[in-house]
Image (cartoon, grey):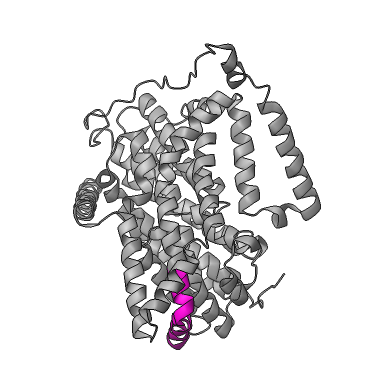
C-alpha cells in the first residue's frame, strides 16, 4: 500500500512539474523575442554603458563599425558546423545506421533513455549533427515502440544541446581559442592560444561528461511516464511517415550526368583525406584539430557518404536556412566586442569579477554569470567573444587556469539551452513537436544539472594549476 501511495505521489509531482514547464514555455513563446532581437538589445546596452564610461557617440560608432566584420572567418566556421553536421546526418548510410539503432529499445522508458544517450554521444562529435541525428532516431524509434510520450522523447533527443555538447569536439569556444587565426587580436593579447589539451582533452572534462550523461539518462528513465499515462505522438496529431526524400532521381540530359556520378566526388575525397593525413601526421592529433580541420573532416565525410554531387548539394541546400541566424547575429557580437575593448569596459568588468571573486570562487561565479547571460544571448561562440576578454583577464589576475575558464563557460553555456527554444528549431522540424512540449521535461533536467555543474566546476578547478598565456 505504501508503495502504491508513493508511486501515485510521484506521478502527481511529475505532472505538476510538466505543467509548470509548459506554462513557462508558453510564457516565453509569447513574450520572448527572436534571438536576433536579444543580440540587438545587447548592442544598445553596451553602447549606453560605453557612453557612461566617457566614450563619445562618434567613438562608439567607429568602435562598432571597425569590429563589425572582425568575426567573418569565425562566423563562417560556425555556419559550417551546422551545414556539415546536417549533411552527414541526412546521408543514406547514416539513415540506415539510425534505422538499425532504432531496433534495440523495446519499452517506452528504455526508448526515451536510449535516445537521450545517443543524442548526447552524438553531440560530443557535433552539435549540428546531434540535432538531426536524434530527430531521425526519434522518428524511427517512435514507429517501433508503442506508448512513448512524445514530449519526453523530444526532450531526450534535445539533451545533447542541453548537457554536454559544449564539452565535445564542436565546442566553439574551445576550438576558437585553439585557432590563432580566429582569435581577435585584442583577445589574443590577453589569452594567447589555449590548446585543446588544456580544455577538451583533460580528465576533468571527461569527469563532467560522464557525470552529466549518467545524470541525464537517470532522469529520463525515472521521469518517463508509462504507456498508460503517456501522451503519444498520435494523440498530438503527429504522424511519422516513411521518409521518401532520399531519392535524387536520374539525369535527364547529358549535361546532368556528372551531377549523378561519383566521378568527381572520388578525387575530391582523396585529396581531402591526403590533406588530413598530412595535418595529423605532422602536427599530431590534438594540435591539428582546430575549427578549420574539424569542419573540413565533416565536409569530406559528407561528400563521401552522399557519393554524388547531386545528393550532396541537395542536403547542403536544406541545411542553409538553419544558419541564417548565425550569419546575422555574429557581426553584432563582433561589434559589441569592439565597443567593449574601445571603451575600456573589459577592464571594468574584469576588475568587478576580481573584486567579488577569489581564486577558488571565480569558476562558480563565471559559471552562474554565463548561464544567466545565455538566456538572453543564445549563441555559444558569439557570446564567448563578448565574455572572453574580461573573464580571461580576471582569471589571469587571480591565477586561475585559463583552459578551465573556457570549460567553465562551456559547461554553463549549455544550461540555458534547456529552456531556450532558439536551438530546438531543427529538431522540432523533424519531430513535429513544439518548444513548449519539450519544456516540462527539459526544466526537470535543468533543476538537476545546475547544481551538479556548479559543484563540479568548483571542485575540479582545485585540481588544475595556473598556466600563463601561450603566445605563438
User: Looking at the picture, how far across and down is residue 276, in whole percent?
Assistant: 73, 44
- Residue 457, compared with residue 433, is above or below; it is below
Query: Residue 347: x percent and y percent?
Result: 48, 83
Above/below status of 83 relative to 410: above
Is residue 66 rendered to the left or right of residue 377?
right
Q: Where on the picture, by quarter, is residue 225?
A: top left
Please check the rendered image and state whether residue 356 is part of the magenta-colored stretch, yes or no.
Answer: yes
State whether the magenta stretch is mostly helix, strand or loop. Answer: helix
Measuring 43% from the left and 22% from the top, which residue is drawn there? 245
Using the rendered image of the protein, determine whether residue 229 is visible from the camera's viewpoint.
yes
Residue 83 locus on image (x, y percent): 50, 41
Q: Which of 215 and 465 lies nearest the eye of the viewer?
A: 465
* Residues rendered magenta in the picture: 336-357
Residue at left offset 51%, top offset 74%: 389
Which residue does the image show at 29% across and 54% down from the upper left? 34
Judging depth in this view, the residue of 16 and 347 nearest the camera is 347
Amino acid at each position: 500500500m505504501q508503495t502504491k501511495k508513493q508511486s501515485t505521489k510521484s506521478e502527481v509531482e511529475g505532472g505538476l512539474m510538466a505543467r509548470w514547464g509548459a506554462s513557462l514555455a508558453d510564457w516565453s513563446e509569447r513574450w520572448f523575442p527572436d534571438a536576433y532581437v536579444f543580440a540587438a538589445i545587447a548592442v544598445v546596452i553596451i553602447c549606453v554603458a560605453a557612453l557612461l564610461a566617457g566614450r563619445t557617440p562618434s567613438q562608439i560608432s567607429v568602435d562598432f563599425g571597425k569590429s563589425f566584420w572582425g568575426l567573418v572567418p569565425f562566423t563562417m566556421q560556425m555556419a559550417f558546423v551546422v551545414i556539415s553536421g546536417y549533411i552527414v546526418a541526412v546521408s543514406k548510410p547514416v539513415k540506415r545506421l539510425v534505422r538499425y539503432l532504432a531496433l534495440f529499445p523495446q519499452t517506452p522508458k528504455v526508448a526515451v533513455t536510449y535516445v537521450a544517450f545517443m543524442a548526447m554521444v552524438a553531440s560530443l562529435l557535433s552539435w549540428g549533427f546531434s540535432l538531426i541525428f536524434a530527430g531521425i532516431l526519434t522518428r524511427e524509434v517512435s514507429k517501433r515502440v508503442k506508448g512513448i510520450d512524445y514530449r519526453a522523447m523530444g526532450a531526450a533527443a534535445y539533451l545533447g544541446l542541453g548537457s554536454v555538447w559544449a564539452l565535445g569536439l564542436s565546442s566553439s569556444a574551445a576550438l576558437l581559442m585553439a585557432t590563432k587565426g580566429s582569435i581577435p587580436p585584442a583577445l589574443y593579447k590577453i589569452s594567447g592560444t589555449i590548446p585543446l589539451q588544456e580544455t577538451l582533452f583533460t580528465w576533468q572534462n571527461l569527469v563532467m561528461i560522464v557525470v552529466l550523461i549518467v545524470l541525464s539518462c537517470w532522469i529520463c528513465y525515472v521521469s518517463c511516464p508509462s504507456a498508460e499515462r503517456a501522451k503519444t505522438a498520435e494523440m498530438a496529431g503527429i504522424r511519422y511517415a516513411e521518409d521518401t526524400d532520399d531519392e535524387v532521381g536520374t539525369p535527364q540530359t547529358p549535361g546532368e550526368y556528372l551531377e549523378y556520378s561519383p566521378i568527381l566526388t572520388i578525387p575530391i575525397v582523396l585529396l581531402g583525406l591526403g590533406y588530413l593525413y598530412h595535418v595529423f601526421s605532422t602536427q599530431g592529433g590534438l594540435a591539428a584539430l582546430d575549427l578549420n580541420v574539424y569542419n573540413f573532416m565533416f565536409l569530406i565525410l559528407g561528400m563521401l557518404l552522399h557519393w554524388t554531387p547531386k545528393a550532396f548539394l541537395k542536403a547542403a541546400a536544406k541545411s542553409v536556412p538553419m544558419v541564417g541566424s548565425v550569419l546575422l547575429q555574429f557581426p553584432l557580437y563582433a561589434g559589441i566586442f569592439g565597443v567593449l575593448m574601445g571603451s575600456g569596459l573589459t577592464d571594468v568588468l574584469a576588475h568587478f569579477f576580481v573584486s567579488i571573486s577569489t581564486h577558488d570562487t571565480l569558476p562558480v561565479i563565471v559559471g552562474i554569470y554565463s548561464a544567466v547571460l545565455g538566456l538572453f544571448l543564445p549563441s555559444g561562440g558569439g557570446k564567448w567573444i563578448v565574455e572572453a576578454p574580461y573573464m580571461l583577464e580576471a582569471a589571469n589576475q587571480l591565477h586561475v587556469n585559463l583552459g578551465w575558464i573556457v570549460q567553465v563557460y562551456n559547461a554553463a553555456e549549455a544550461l540555458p539551452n534547456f529552456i531556450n527554444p532558439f536551438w530546438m528549431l531543427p529538431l522540432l522540424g523533424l519531430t513535429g513537436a513544439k518548444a513548449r512540449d519539450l519544456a516540462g521535461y527539459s526544466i526537470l533536467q535543468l533543476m538537476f544539472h545546475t547544481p551538479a555543474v556548479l559543484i563540479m566546476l568548483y571542485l575540479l578547478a582545485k585540481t588544475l594549476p595556473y598556466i600563463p598565456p601561450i603566445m605563438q
